Image (tube, rainbow, N blue to C red):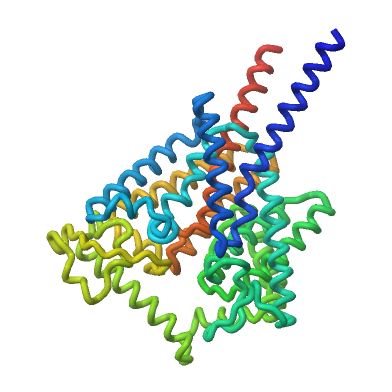
Amino acid sequence: MKTVNNINNFSKKKDTFIQIILNILVALPALFLLVNNYPYLMILSILLVLLMGIIFLLSKPLITNTHKIILLILFVIYIYFILSYFYSGQLISKLLAYNFIRNDGNFFFCYLPFFILAIPFFNYKKTIDIYFIFLFFIFTIFSLFGILEYISGKTSITIQTDVSAGKMFTALNFAHNATGSVYAVVSLFALIFFLNEQKKKLKFIYLVVLITCLAGLFLTKSRGSYIGFAVALVIILWINYRSLKKFFISISIFIAASIPLVFATGGYERIFQIFKFSKDINIAYTTVVRLELWKKAWYLFSKSPIFGIGFGRFNDLDSFNYYRLKGYPGILSLYTDSNYVFSASTAHNSYLQFLAETGIVGLGLLILFWILCYRIVYKAYNFSNNIYYKRIYLCALASIIALFALSFTENYMSSTTIIICVSMIISLSVGLFWQEKNEYNLKLNNLIKVN
C-alpha cells in the first residue's frame, strides 16, 4: 500500500512539474518583444508553443468554447487575405518566403497566438501569472538600461539618435515606434496592477515597474505611442472607477506625477510636436511623408473600395505604376504585376492600409474580430467576482483600446511586436474566462449535490 502511494505521489509531482514547464514555455514570447533585431528568438518561441498545441490537439481534440467565435472570424480573415493575395497575381512561393512573412505578410504570423492559446494544454491562470512576471521583468530591465545609456551617453545599444527626435530609446528593436507601442501597452498593465493591488510590498513593486516603464515609453519619443497610451488611460480609468470624482482625481494625480518624467526624458518636446506643426525641416518631413502615404492609401482605396488592390500589394505600387491597376476603377481594381517589394514600409495607418489592400470587406472583418474580442473580455470583466481575474480582464481591454488608438498613426494591427503582446494577453484572457466559468459551474454543481 505504501509503495502504491509513493508511486501516486511521484506521478502527481511529475504531472505538476510538466504543467509548470508548459506554463513557462507558453509565456516565453513575452521575453522577446523588445528584440526584433533578432527575430528568430520570437519566431522560435511561437513555433515551439505552436508545436505543443498541435501535439495536444492531436491527442485530445479540444478548444475552449469562449474562443470559438473569434477563431471563426479570424479563420475567415485568413482565408480572405490569402484569396486576396492570389487574386492579385502573387505566387505561392512568395507567400511562404521569409521576407514576406517578416514584412508584408506578418499578419499571418502575429495572430497565431489566438489559435494556439485556444487549445487548453496548460493552466491559464498560472500561465498569465508567469506571462506578466516575464513582461514586467524584461521591460523594467530594458528601461533601466536605456535610462543609464540616455544619461551617460557612453554606449548606444538601446539608444539611437534621430535628426528629428534626438536621442530615443529603441531597446533591441529596429524602430522606436515598435518599442513605444509595446511600452504603451505594458505601462497600462503596470498601472492597472498598481491601482488594484492591496498588498503594500507588491504595490510598491508595481509602482517601480510603472515608473520605469513610463520612463521607457517617454524615452522612445514615439508620438503615436503617447497618444495611444493617453486614450487608453482615460477609458480604462473610467472603467476601473465608474465614478467622476475618483476618475478626475486619478487623472490629475497621474498627470502631476508624470510631469517630472516627461521633462527628464525629453518627451515634452515630442508631445508639443503633436499639437504644433513644426517649422523644423526634419520634423516637418516626417509629417509630410505620412500625409503622402495616407493620400496614396486613400487613392488606392478609391480605385478598389470593396475588395482592395490585393493583400501585400501596397509596397509594390508607387506613383509611377498606378496606371497598371487592372479591372474597373472605382469598383474593383487589382495590382497584378510581378514585382514584389518586401519592406517595413506601410501606410502608417492600419485603417487606410487595410482599406487600400483588402477594401471595406477586409477592414470590416478585422474590426469585427477586435470588437468581438472586446465584447468577450468585457463580459468576463463584468462576470467575475475575483479581483485578480478582473485585473487581467482590464489589462486585456486596455490593450485593445490602445491598439485601436495606436493604429491611427502606424499599421499596428499588423505589427509583430505589438500584436504578439496583445494577441497573447487577449487569447489568455479569453481562456481564463473559460477556465473561470468551468470552476464556477463545478462549484455550483457541488453545491447543488450537497443540498
Kindly indicate the quadrant of the structure image that contains residue 318: bottom left
* Residue 64 percent across, percent down from the top left: 52, 31
Q: Can residue 128 be seen?
A: yes
Residue at image x 22%, y 55%? 89
The quarter of the picture where the N terminus appears is top right
Q: Quadrant of the C terminus?
A: top right
Where residue 18 appears, x then y in whole percent? 69, 32
Residue 14 locus on image (x, y percent) = 74, 27
Residue most extreme to the left: 328
In the rendered view, does 435 fall on the left or right side of 76?
A: right
Q: Nearer the viewer, residue 94 or 305?
A: 94
State the residue in front, 125 or 93: 93
The answer to which quarter of the image holds residue 4 is top right
Task: Name the side, left or right, on which 150 lies relative to 238.
Answer: right
Q: Position of residue 62 (x, y in %)?
A: 51, 27
Q: Residue at x 46, y 61 (%)?
A: 412
Residue found 43% across the figure and 63% down from its top: 411
Q: Is residue 315 above or below residue 48?
A: below
